[in-house]
Image (cartoon, helix red, strand yellow):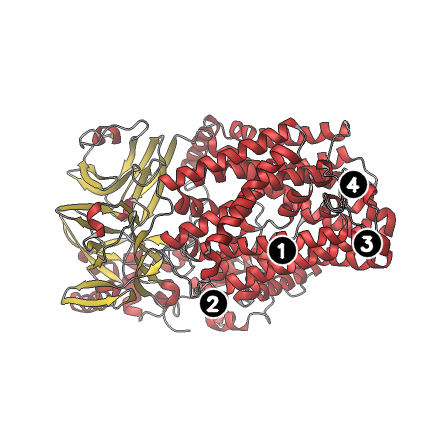
């Protein structure tokens, strides 16, 4: 084994120990790892024995248990699933998210009109949902924050539909969490009561306790592979139930037809009050498109696989639902189905036999049981977000290598962002810089406090108007040359942005360095940066040899020379780390340090731990949990009351959910998102189906969804509360849509993007998109030796490590706003801010925005001159207005 660690058996022994602790494997299963890390070498085995007092062979499993074999089998299955072609990934994710517990209400909802009419209506409304899922697929394909960022459905909607759309989404998610959780409690308990003879209220108690367990953990830790497997099992169970029911189908029941207003039949609201809502809920899987897109678009950026896979899945769901309705409604009489308060499995089991109880119980546990956990987590998290956040944090801020960002929630036009940077010691006192970004104004302030930094006082030095809640105080607990420890108190939201470097040294590159360079890098990495005299002393190299090594490391971009008041210092320029830092065993092996003696840091750790626990109690963590639990507990108690008073209705809740919420999220939202994304999107899909945006189709789906609300509120529903909610929802949607139109949500946007993609060999690209289409622009790329000129809508930027600035001259147009986005995609596919300064020339006015404070994005409102003149956008990398 060559390179870093080749002559360090202790390091390889530490790696062996870490692998053995985290993973279970046999010696025969990892021949490549054994060979690469030299686990079979005598020196490594001796080092392991000396350090851990046991043989290295103890890290291997000699006789794996059945459980271990099952876990390995699961890992192989998960690996195979995650390697599926993008089309099949999109198909599988969309289908398994769509076909769920709602299918158990379909036969009950369609019992009144008959199986053939119900099947035909399923196909018609299914085709509408096929169009809306295509709308969602194109919209997320045009979204940069979905494709490259860390955002999901909420930020995606807010980006395209503004604060009105975000408000509607929040209300809709609140309703769906409550109604779906209530319906799943009822469906779960009533079905298992019939199958396993335990009273329904007891089943609700059991499921509620399971939900509390996962609420305490605040995570289900479900993976894409697990979701696909559970979904596939559910679909298999439904098809199996349909197969064993087919022999019981009776032709006269299939032929039953009772369509209102046909052949003189009267219109009976009670007959159709469940039909539309239950069908809409059964086809609802649109919000899962955000998760699906993040997986699929990484492997097929064109968006074709996402579009084709999701629409094919919706077509398959139509077929599955039609078969299920024909089979179940052809077996059970309409009157028996219509009288059910639970799911269709209860009368089906009585008609077909005990196999339905077995398969149905498994389906209910997997679909409704898992679903209740998801919805209770969503309900809990949504409520907890509204509670007051913790006011204080203990933070270690490194010198000039990180920024503590404070920001107020709001639209980009009035959001205030503060960036706190530690500059080091100045005359023995800690020195800070506060970067202030408000709209298009940027200010830089410096302060040298002795005990406490007052952010509000620094803000008062700017001409910005005072904002309620804006500001912070930072108590200085300990300050040194390389970092400062702070206790920060603020009501603002706080995030951390680490240093960005255009080139850097990753762990894989570090392993391959020659021994002389590796030794110097170890010393620099250990300290973050070091002076020349420190390196001479610690590496014991003569000055000429050390100069050669430092010159080579600097040329490769692994070391950067930093000028300080005390002279030159050499700083390690590392690629950002992901996950946890290197364990202490690795650092001890690198430095040859002895094991710390027991109790060495015990007193300090115990004191810090006690203080931290005391602080957590003062913050009311348990109280916050109980407050977040209240809505879930209320849903549980309401379910118990409904069951004890025989007032429950699984299908009724599913129908109400479909009309009130799904008509919005699965009908109106996709239409609005398509219209907005085609004018404001940052990305352009490889294939755009223009007919999807035809006014007749778009307006027709919007009016169909909206009219369904008013029809249920005015005619179909008879309950006054249901009618009032339906009418209020319809009016609210109309008001919000008009507000979106007035605020220019559907107006064109110009987008200038600069992206460094480390998943594609570090390639850096630019793109200019206006009105949803790639638009050629004049582009000037500035390097130390001159400028490179381009006339293109997109292109590759060579030698990103040498790039100083990128200057774009965007063609004139009637744009509502201009978005500038500079970001980097890590090798793990995660988005990071690419710190830069943006200068936008608007006539004689120049707007300056520090992207490091705005999550890499700047949104500049339009001015009248944009329609007549090119507007200049200059992105200056790795710099600030003032240093």
Helix, strand or loop for disc 3: loop
Tell me if residue 479 comes above or below residue 675 in the rendering.
Answer: above
Judging depth in this view, the residue of 617 and 339 nearest the camera is 339
N-terminal of the pair, mark 2 or mark 3, is 2
- Residue named by callout 1: 96
Compared to 389, does 836 lie above or below?
below
- Of badges 3 and 4, the one in the foreground is 3
Q: Position of residue 482 (x, y in %)?
A: 26, 46
Horizontal arrangement in the rendering, residue 271 relative to residue 373 (left or right): right
Could you tell which of marks 1 and 3 lies nearer the N-terminus? 1
Secondary element under disc 4, as helix, strand or loop, is helix
Question: Counting residues from the N terminus, which is met first, the one under dot 3 or under dot 4?
Answer: 3
Mark 4: few/some/many CA within 10 Å (<14, 14-19, 20+): some
Q: Badge 2: few (under 14), some or many (20 or more) residues near its Cα, within 10 Å?
A: many
For the N terminus, give its image quadrant: bottom left
The quarter of the picture where residue 313 lies is bottom right
Q: Which residue is mark 4?
A: 338
The residue at the point 24 percent across, 42 percent down is: 422
Does residue 744 appear in this view? yes
Mark 1 → mark 4, Cα distance in angstroms: 27 Å
Q: Which tag, 1 or 2, sits closer to the chain's start?
A: 2
Q: Is 736 situated above or below 16?
A: above
Mark earlier in primary sequence (1, 4): 1
Closer to the camera in the image, 556 or 57: 556
What residue is pinned by disc 3?
A: 255
Q: Residue at x 36, y 57 (%)?
A: 772
Q: Is residue 229 left or right of residue 476?
A: right
Q: CA distance from mark 1 to mark 2?
A: 48 Å
Residue 389's tag is: none
Eye-nearest disc, 4 or 2: 4
Q: Kindly state the secondary structure of the residue where label 1 is placed.
A: helix
């Amino acid at each position: 084994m060559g390179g870093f660690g080749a002559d360090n058996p202790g390091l390889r022994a530490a790696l062996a120990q870490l692998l053995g602790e985290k993973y279970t494997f046999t010696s025969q299963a990892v021949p490549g790892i054994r060979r690469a890390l030299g686990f079979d070498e005598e020196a490594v085995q001796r080092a392991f024995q000396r350090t851990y007092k046991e043989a290295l062979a103890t890290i291997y499993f000699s006789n794996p248990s059945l459980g271990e074999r099952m876990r390995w089998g699961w890992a192989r299955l998960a690996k195979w699933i995650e390697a599926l072609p993008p089309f099949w990934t999109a198909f599988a994710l969309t289908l398994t998210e769509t076909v769920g517990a709602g299918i158990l209400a379909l036969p009950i909802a369609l019992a009144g009109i008959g199986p053939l009419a119900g099947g035909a209506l399923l196909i018609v409304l299914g085709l509408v949902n096929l169009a809306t899922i295509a709308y969602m697929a194109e919209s997320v394909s045009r979204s940069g924050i979905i494709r490259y960022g860390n955002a999901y459905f909420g930020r995606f909607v807010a980006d395209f539909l503004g604060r009105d759309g975000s408000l509607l989404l929040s209300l809709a998610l609140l309703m769906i969490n409550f109604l779906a959780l209530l319906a799943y409690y009822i469906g779960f308990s009533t079905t298992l009561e019939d199958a396993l003879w335990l009273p329904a209220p007891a089943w609700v108690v059991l499921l509620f306790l399971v939900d509390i367990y996962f609420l305490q953990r605040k995570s289900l830790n479900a993976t894409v592979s697990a979701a696909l497997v559970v979904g596939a099992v559910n679909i298999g169970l439904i098809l199996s139930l349909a197969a064993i029911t087919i022999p019981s189908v009776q032709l006269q029941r299939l032929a039953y037809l009772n369509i209102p207003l046909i052949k003189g039949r009267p219109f009976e609201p009670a007959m159709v009050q469940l039909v539309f809502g239950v069908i809409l809920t059964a086809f609802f899987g649109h919000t899962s498109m955000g998760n699906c897109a993040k997986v699929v678009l990484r492997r097929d950026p064109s968006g074709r696989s996402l579009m084709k896979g999701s629409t094919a899945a919706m077509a398959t769901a139509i077929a599955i639902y039609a078969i299920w309705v024909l089979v179940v409604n052809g077996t059970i009489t309409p009157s028996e189905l219509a009288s059910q308060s639970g799911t269709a499995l209860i009368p089906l089991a009585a008609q077909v036999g005990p196999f339905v109880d077995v398969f149905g119980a498994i389906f209910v546990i997997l679909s409704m049981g898992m679903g209740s956990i998801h919805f209770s987590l969503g309900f809990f998290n949504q409520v907890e977000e509204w509670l007051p956040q913790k006011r204080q944090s203990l933070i270690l801020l490194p010198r000039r290598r990180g920024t503590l960002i404070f920001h107020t929630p709001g639209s980009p036009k009035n959001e205030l962002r503060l960036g706190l940077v530690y500059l080091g010691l100045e005359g023995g006192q800690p020195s800070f810089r506060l970067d202030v970004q408000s709209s298009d104004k940027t200010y830089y302030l410096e302060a040298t406090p002795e005990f406490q930094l007052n952010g509000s006082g620094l803000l008062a030095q700017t001409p910005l108007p005072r904002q309620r809640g804006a500001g912070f105080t930072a108590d200085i607990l300990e300050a040194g040359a390389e970092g400062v420890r702070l206790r920060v108190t603020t009501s603002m939201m706080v995030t951390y942005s680490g240093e960005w470097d255009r080139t850097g040294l990753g762990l894989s590159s570090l392993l391959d360095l020659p021994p002389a360079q590796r030794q110097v890098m170890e010393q620099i990495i250990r300290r973050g940066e070091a002076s020349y005299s420190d390196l001479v002393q610690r590496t014991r190299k003569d000055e000429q040899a050390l100069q050669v090594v430092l010159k080579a490391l600097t040329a490769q971009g692994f070391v950067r020379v930093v000028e300080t008041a005390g002279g030159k210092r050499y700083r390690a320029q590392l690629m950002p780390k992901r996950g946890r830092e290197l364990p202490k065993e690795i650092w001890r092996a690198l430095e040859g340090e002895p094991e710390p003696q027991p109790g060495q840091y015990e007193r300090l750790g115990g004191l810090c731990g006690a203080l931290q626990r005391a602080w957590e109690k003062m913050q009311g963590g348990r109280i916050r949990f109980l407050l977040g639990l209240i809505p879930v507990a209320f849903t549980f108690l309401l379910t118990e009351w409904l069951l004890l008073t025989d007032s429950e209705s699984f299908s009724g809740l599913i129908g109400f959910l479909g009309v009130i919420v799904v008509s919005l999220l699965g009908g109106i939202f996709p239409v609005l998102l398509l219209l907005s994304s085609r004018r404001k999107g940052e990305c352009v899909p490889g294939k755009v189906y223009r007919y999807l945006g035809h006014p007749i189709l778009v307006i027709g789906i919007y009016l169909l969804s909206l009219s369904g609300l008013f029809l249920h509120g005015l005619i179909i529903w008879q309950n006054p509360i249901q009618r009032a909610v339906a009418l209020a929802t319809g009016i609210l949607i109309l008001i919000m849509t008009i507000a979106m139109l007035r605020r220019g949500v559907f107006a064109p946007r110009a987008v200038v993007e600069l992206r460094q993609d480390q998943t594609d060999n570090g390639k850096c690209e630019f793109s200019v998109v206006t009105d949803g289409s790639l638009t050629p622009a004049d582009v000037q790329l500035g390097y130390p030796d001159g400028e490179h000129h381009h006339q293109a809508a997109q292109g590759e930027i060579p030698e990103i490590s040498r790039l100083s600035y990128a200057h774009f001259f965007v063609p004139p147009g009637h744009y509502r706003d201009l978005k500038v986005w500079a970001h980097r995609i890590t090798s793990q596919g995660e988005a990071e801010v690419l710190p830069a300064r943006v200068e936008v020339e608007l006539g004689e006015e120049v707007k300056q925005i520090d992207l490091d404070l705005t999550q890499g994005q700047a949104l500049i409102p339009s001015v009248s001159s944009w329609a007549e003149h090119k507007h200049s956008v200059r992105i200056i990398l790795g710099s600030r207005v003032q240093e």
